[in-house]
Every structure is written in structure tokens, then in C-alpha cells.
């Protein structure tokens, strides 16, 4: 390994909201940088002006901030290698493309879009569906390799539109060792003469990407597998300029939970989970839901993402961000695509919710409820409900009966359990319950068990009735804990009111 200081970058194109696959790329870059005391950089790759989407850059920065994986160099963050937005660096790129032309490693090409289309369709008719501008076909095209030098100059002086293309060497094996995939070998006969510089005066992704990675001293390029086919061209460019190549690591794809193929927004819509870190509203007003707004904790989200394509090699699954920084290595990133698992995603969230203290959850819940209930009132509610909740808001949605009397009673429980003797039984139980002193879970439980024993009744015949009257529900946390939380008076009142309400429903 060379002794270059570790400098890695996340290089999104601002073409819309960041997909969670992009967040994972950013995360692995962040973890790798931290692990090696390196620097994590963000660079915005906006050379394709036709795909630019207003607000996307702010979205990306906000999402990384929410995840807690902010870079230390980037737009608005400072750093010695700025600007970090490619459109602000546009003047920088042309000389590099010209340098390659001067060295006969690239050339001007004047073919219009129509001419190229024509070539493609002619080739198709002749049974060659994948026509490419390459080391063979270039000789019959309109470029500085085929036109006389004075005509080339004339065209340039006259302002004719042209692009600069790489002059792909013939029949040469390009090799590099990917940190995840091992040795990759591609023969240049399979590569085309990609455009490096466009007629609109902007570099293409390929040129800008390697010029910037070089001038920003990037040591490792960690990016999605979809960029693997571009890597040989990038290697050729590094070599053409005589620059030290960075190391490459191409991350596995995120796959749909069912079947094969890349995880898409459509899978999220279809199966009911977000594929974006935070909410995004399109120009047409369509809302894409985010993990943040769904109620995920950023640390749970990050923990889940870290495991999509990496594992520590031990059974441990819960990792704080610091622990991830410590444990992460590229050699434990898998080559195979990682299947997204919505159940596992919720599981991570539940684990993070459960370990939060009751009062911390109550703080979060009171905020969510705009202060409708105080932290003091919500703390015991959180204590009882957190084992069953996935999101903070579930504690209220599922446990609002701990704060307010029920207004509805579970119909299934009524149908199954509210038998003829139920009313008398519950009246008796109410009287027995009102004698419990001190009124705590333990005493309520002992009294309840005595009550059953005396009447030779099973728990299943009575507890659901008690629960129904107190909470309106068919399921929930310990009834004895609930009773203690509500207090004797409230329990007695709810049993009375519940009997009236349920008898009416039953009648
Ligand atoms: N701009 C590319 C993207 O949108 C970056 C690819 C790379 O990291 O080289 O993903």
C-alpha cells in the first residue's frame, strides 16, 4: 500500500434526491476515512447540466448531516482543494483535454448528433446493433485524425461545434486491482473512444472526475458497482497524464427485497418502505418519503445501511457510528449484491428505540405531540410501551389509553370473550380491585390471582375482559403495570364506564 494520506470523496451528481444506495456509498467513504485518520470530502459532479435538479445539492448535504456523516471538505465546508462543485471549476478542465490532444492521446471530433445517429442506424441495418465510435470506426468519421490539419484548424476557428474524444489504444489489456473485486482486466478493444470534453464547453463526467480526484489528492475511490465499467477508461486517463492512480473499490449493488435487480423507488412504493433518507418533493409536487420523517433514528438507519454489503465477521449486529468506524474494513465488503430487507430495517430501529431511556423517549414524544403531554406524564407511558414500539410515535398511537380513557372497544375481544356472565364478573372484580392497598402492580396481580382461584376461572377468561374495559384493546403490556399507572380511582371508573359501553355494543 502506498503511503498516501487517506483522502476519499463522495461525488454525487445533483440529479434528484439521494437514494439510500448513495447514502451507503457516502457512509463507507466516511467509515474508511475515520478508520485511517483520513479526510472525507464531498464533491458535487454537476457537469451534465441537462440532468441538474434544483435543490438536490442542499438535499444531499442535509441528508448527510442528519445521518451524522458530514464530510470535512466540500461546498460550504471549506478545504484547500476547492471549489468542490464542478461547474465552478469549469475553466480548469479544457487544458487537460487539450494536453491529451497535443500528445496524440485524444482528438477533436466534428461529427454531428445526426451523423452519429445515421452511422448507428446504418450499422444496425447491416446486423451490427452496437455501433461504437472506437479505434476501428474512428478512421471513417469526421475528426482530427481523418481531416487535414488546416481544415481542423479552420473548423475550430469558425466555431464549429466539436467534442474531444479519448484515442483508445488498440488491443491493450488494462489491469487494476479492485480492493473488493480483486484483479480486473479489460481489453481496450472492448472500449469506445469516450467523449472527454463536450461541445457545450463542459468536461464529461470521466474527465472531470479524474482531473478532480487527482487535484484533490484522492487516495481511494470508493463508489458503486455501476461505475466499474468506467474504471478502465479512468485508469487509461491516469496513465495518460502520468498521475498516480488512486486505489479503487467498487461496492456491491443494493438489490430489491424480492426477486433480482436494483432496489428502486418503485420497490419502496410497492412494499411500503422509503428508499430516500429524508423527504423530497418533486417539482411536480410528488412526495418521496424519507427515513427521517418516517421516524427512524439516524443511528439505526446508519447501522442498517452499514450491514447492506458489509459485515464484521462476528455475530454482533448493533454498532454505534464510532464502533463502525473502528470495525469497518474494505476486505469485509462483499462482492455480491446486498438484498434490502424491510423487516430487518425495522428491527434495527426497534433495537435502538428499546435502549433509549424512558425519559429520553418521553422528551422525543412530547416534541412529536407538540407538547400536548408533559415529559413527566409520558415517561411511564414510554416505559410500558417501548418494548412494543418501532417508532416513537407508536408509543402514543398504541398507548394513548394510558393517557386518556378509551373511546372504542375491540370488537373481536367483545365477540370472543364478552360472555353472559362477563358483566357480573367485572362488577365483582371492580369491587375486589377497589380494596387493593397500596395500589401497585404487585398487589393488583396477587389480588387478581386470588380472584381467579376463588372462582376457579382461568386467566384467559378474565384478563382479556379487564384489559378490554381499561384499555379498549385486545392486546398490550402487563395489565398489572397498566393498573398501577392509571391508579385505583381511574381503574374503577374505567371498569364502570367500560361495562356500560361494551354491554351496549353487545346488546
Ligand atoms: N458522479 C458520480 C455519481 O453520481 C460519481 C461516481 C464516482 O464516484 O466516481 O455517482
Image (cartoon, rainbow, N blue to C red):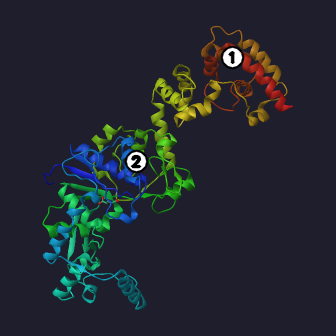
Quadrant of ligand 1: it is bottom left
Name the quadrant containing residue 93.
bottom left
**How crowded is the residue under tag 2: few (<14 C-alpha within 10 Å), some, or many (20+)?**
many
Query: Which residue of the protein is positioned furthest toward the front in this rendering?
Result: 158
Q: Which of 59 and 431 is in front in this view?
A: 59
Give coordinates of residue 280: x percent, y percent: 48, 50
Residue that badge 2 annotates: 305
Badge 1: few (under 14), some or many (20 or more) residues near its Cα, within 10 Å?
some
Q: Residue furthest right?
A: 507
From this view, report whether residue 441 is shown above or below residue 62.
above
Cα separation between marks 2 and 1: 45 Å
The picture places residue 114, in percent across and down from the top left corner, at 38, 83
Q: Position of residue 352 (x, y in %)?
A: 45, 35
Look at 70% across and 27% down and name the residue there. Answer: 406
Displayed quadrant of residue 453: top right
Sequence-wise first label, 2 or 1: 2
In the structure shown, which secondary structural element does the residue marked by tag 2 occupy?
helix
Position above or below: 271 against 465: below
Judging by the rendered image, the residue that carries numbered circle 1 is 490
**Which part of the image, by quadrant, shows the C terminus?**
top right
Residue 307 seen: no
Instruction: Give the structural element (helix, strand or loop) at label 1.
Output: helix
Amino acid at each position: 500500500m502506498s503511503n498516501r494520506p487517506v483522502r476519499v470523496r463522495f461525488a454525487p451528481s445533483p440529479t434528484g434526491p439521494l437514494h439510500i444506495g448513495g447514502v451507503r456509498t457516502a457512509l463507507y467513504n466516511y467509515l474508511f476515512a475515520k478508520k485511517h485518520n483520513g479526510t472525507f470530502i464531498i464533491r458535487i459532479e454537476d457537469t451534465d447540466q441537462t440532468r441538474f435538479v434544483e435543490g438536490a445539492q442542499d438535499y444531499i448535504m442535509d441528508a448527510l448531516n442528519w445521518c451524522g456523516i458530514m464530510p470535512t471538505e466540500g461546498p460550504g465546508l471549506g478545504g484547500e482543494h476547492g471549489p468542490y462543485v464542478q461547474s465552478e471549476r469549469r475553466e480548469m478542465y479544457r487544458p487537460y483535454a487539450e494536453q491529451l490532444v497535443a500528445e496524440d492521446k485524444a482528438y477533436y471530433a466534428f461529427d454531428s448528433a445526426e451523423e452519429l445517429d445515421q452511422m448507428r442506424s446504418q450499422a444496425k441495418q447491416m446486423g451490427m446493433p452496437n455501433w461504437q465510435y472506437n479505434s476501428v470506426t474512428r478512421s471513417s468519421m469526421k475528426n482530427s485524425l481523418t481531416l487535414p490539419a488546416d481544415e481542423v484548424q479552420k473548423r475550430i476557428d469558425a466555431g464549429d461545434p466539436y467534442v474531444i474524444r479519448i484515442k483508445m489504444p488498440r488491443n491493450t489489456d488494462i489491469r487494476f486491482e479492485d480492493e473488493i473485486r480483486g484483479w480486473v482486466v479489460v481489453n481496450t478493444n472492448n472500449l469506445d473512444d469516450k467523449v472527454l470534453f463536450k461541445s457545450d464547453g463542459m468536461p464529461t463526467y470521466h474527465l472531470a472526475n479524474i482531473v478532480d480526484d487527482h487535484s484533490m489528492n484522492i487516495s481511494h475511490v470508493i463508489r458503486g458497482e455501476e461505475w466499474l465499467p468506467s474504471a478502465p477508461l479512468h485508469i487509461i486517463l491516469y496513465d495518460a497524464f502520468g498521475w498516480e492512480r488512486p486505489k479503487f473499490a467498487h461496492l456491491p449493488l443494493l438489490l430489491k427485497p424480492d426477486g433480482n435487480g436494483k432496489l428502486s423507488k418503485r420497490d419502496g412504493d410497492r412494499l411500503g418502505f422509503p428508499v430516500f433518507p429524508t423527504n423530497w418533493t418533486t417539482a411536480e409536487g410528488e412526495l418521496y418519503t424519507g427515513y427521517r420523517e418516517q421516524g427512524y433514528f439516524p443511528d439505526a438507519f446508519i447501522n442498517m445501511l452499514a450491514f447492506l454489503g458489509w459485515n464484521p465477521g462476528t455475530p454482533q449486529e448493533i454498532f454505534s457510528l464510532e464502533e463502525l468506524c473502528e470495525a469497518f474494513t474494505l476486505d469485509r465488503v462483499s462482492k455480491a449484491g446486498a438484498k434490502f430487507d424491510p423487516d430487518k430495517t425495522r428491527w434495527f430501529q426497534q433495537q435502538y428505540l428499546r435502549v433509549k431511556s424512558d425519559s429520553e423517549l418521553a422528551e422525543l414524544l412530547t416534541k412529536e405531540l407538540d407538547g400536548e403531554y408533559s415529559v413527566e406524564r409520558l415517561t411511564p407511558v414510554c416505559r410500558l410501551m417501548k418494548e412494543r414500539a418501532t417508532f416513537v410515535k407508536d408509543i402514543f398511537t398504541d398507548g394513548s389509553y394510558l393517557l386518556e380513557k378509551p373511546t372504542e372497544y375491540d370488537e373481536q375481544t367483545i365477540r370472543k370473550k364478552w360472555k353472559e356472565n362477563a358483566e357480573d364478573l367485572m362488577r365483582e372484580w371492580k369491587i375486589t380491585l377497589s380494596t387493593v392497598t397500596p395500589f401497585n402492580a404487585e398487589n393488583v396481580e396477587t389480588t387478581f390471582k386470588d380472584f381467579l382461584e376463588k372462582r376457579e376461572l382461568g386467566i384467559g377468561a378474565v384478563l382479556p375482559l379487564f384489559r378490554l374495559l381499561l384499555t379498549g384493546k385486545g392486546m398490550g403490556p402487563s395489565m398489572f403495570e397498566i393498573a398501577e399507572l392509571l391508579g385505583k380511582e381511574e381503574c374503577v371508573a374505567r371498569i364502570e364506564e367500560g361495562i356500560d359501553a361494551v354491554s351496549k355494543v353487545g346488546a
